[in-house]
Every structure is written in C-alpha cells, then in structure tokens.
Image (tube, rainbow, N blue to C red):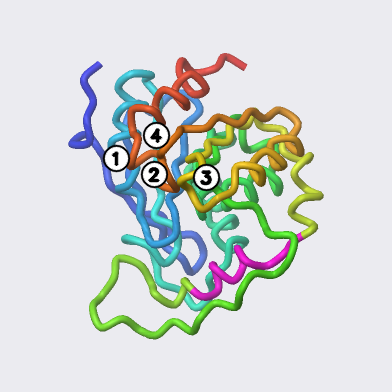
Amino acid sequence: MGVDSSDVVHGELAIGNVTLAFREIGGDQGIPVVLLHALGSCAATWDGFAARLAGSCGRRVIALDLRGHGGSSRTETYSLAAMRDDVLGFLDGRGIERADLVGHSMGGAVAILVAQRAPGRVRRLVVEDTPPPPEVPGEPVDPVTEPAEPLRFDWRLIEPVITEFRTPDPGWWDLLPAISASTLLVSGGPSSHVPVDALVRVSRAVRDCRLVTVEDAGHRVHSVKPDEFWSAVSPFLCPEPRH
C-alpha cells in the first residue's frame, strides 16, 4: 500500500476555548493511533512514522499539535493536565472511543496521564523516553523571556511545563497500576538525559509493560534512529491487535 507524508490530511477541532490542529493519514476504519509530540515540537515530527504505520500496517494515524504548539491555540494555561484533558476532548469530539497512544517526552507524559485518568480509552500505550517525576525537587526553572524571533510554539509554556517535570508527584506513581493498556516504554539509552533505571522503575509499576532500549539514540529516538524506533515499536502496533 503506497502511503507517504504527502497523503496527510490537515484539520482543526475546537474543544471548549482551545482549537487543536491535527494531521491524519490512513483509512477511517479500526482503532486509531494518536501521536503526541514533545515540548517545543509539533505534529509534523511524526510524519515519517505516521506514513509508515498507515502504509505498512493499514493503521489510521492522527498526530496532534498540543496546545501552545504548531497550529493549535495559544492559551493562558499550560499544564500536563490541561493537555491531557485536551486529548480526551479530542477523542470525544472525533467520536473515538478507544485509541492507541504514542507519546514522546512531554507527549509521553500526557499519554500516561490519559491512560491513568481514562484507562478504558487507551488500548495500547507507547512512551518514548519520558522522564518520570523526580523523588526530590529539581533546580528551579530560570525565568523565560520572550524571544526576539517568533517560534512555532508559545514560549510561555516552557517555565510551567519544565517546572512540572522537576516537581515530585507521589500520586503519579500511585496511579501507574491503574493503567490497563498494554504498554511499551522506549529508552534512548545512556546517551539520553532520561535515566534508564527510572524507566525500569516505571515499567515495574505498570501492570502490562515492557521496556526496550534503542542504543545511542539519545532523547529523540524516533527522529535520530527512525529505523530502529520502527523496529522496536512496529511489532507492538502492527498488525493491528484483534482484542
């Protein structure tokens, strides 16, 4: 089946006072795969992977611009919980009862929150090199000033989101066993700033979870090592599971 990034359909969906831009590829049948990007990125980062999922596996694939990123709304509130609610609102708005979620870094954190809040909505979960909350508070985030040149994301989200990543959250760990989705964690190995041992701890707390490492990939696994990322993830998502 010949599918490439030129087959992507662009759209927008209003959810309350937020409009989310998205990119969709593949057929309209079956449980879709929803892709969530990292801080400062956008849905386009997934174009190659999405085309591969649609072409090789026949999957319906939707990549979102999370709030404050790409073509989606700039807002006054930025938090992982707000992005979680946006994703759930998007699923509702598109009439999607269940989805497979794939998230990188911040997108992985949002995907985990969705799977914790609404376990029945997530069938399969792929989390790419996402750091769990720390056990002790991290360094305060330096104040962020408006950049001289425009960005493809809202610079105001940097401070609150990074602060969340550096703040302990015992409740997050307590809710990991609530995740019912079959889960795959992908580590970028020692060259990533996300410690592998932290991901091992996460994998042990989730009921049905496996951890794979793509060596020498660093933090941006799907971008730096796209073929290795595909080899690690595609057996999990393709062919489409029947349950």
State the extent of the magenta-drawn residues as a range.
159-169
Q: Amino acid at mark 2?
A: Ala
Residue toward you, 92 or 43: 43
For label 1, the SS is: helix
Mark 1 — residue?
Answer: 47
The reply to whether dot 4 and dot 2 touch (C-beta < 8 Å) is yes
Which dot, 1 or 4, sits closer to the camera? Answer: 1
Judged by its main secondary structure, the magenta piece is helix
Q: Amino acid at mark 1?
A: Asp
Residue pushed farthest front? 190
Query: Which of pointers 1 and 4 lies earlier in the amino acid sequence?
Result: 1
Residue toward you, 96 or 23: 23
Mark 4 Cα shell of 10 Å, populated few (<14), some (14-19), many (≥20) = many
The reply to whether dot 1 and dot 2 touch (C-beta < 8 Å) is yes
Which dot, 1 or 3, sits closer to the camera? Answer: 3
Mark 3 — residue?
Answer: 129
Question: At which x and y percent is residue 57?
Answer: 38, 19
Question: At which x and y percent is residue 142?
Answer: 50, 81
The reply to whether dot 4 and dot 3 touch (C-beta < 8 Å) is no
Mark 1 Cα shell of 10 Å, populated few (<14), some (14-19), many (≥20) = many
Q: Amino acid at mark 4?
A: Val
Q: CA distance from mark 1 to mark 3?
A: 19 Å
Which residue is depicted at the point 44% across and 48% down? Answer: 219
**How many marks do you count on the picture?**
4
Q: Which mark is residue 63?
A: 2
Mark 3 Cα shell of 10 Å, populated few (<14), some (14-19), many (≥20) = many
Which residue is depicted at the point 38% across and 72% down? Answer: 154
Mark 4 — residue?
Answer: 61
Q: Is residue 232 left or right of residue 22?
A: right
Quarter of the image where the N terminus is located: top left
For label 3, the SS is: loop
For label 4, the SS is: strand
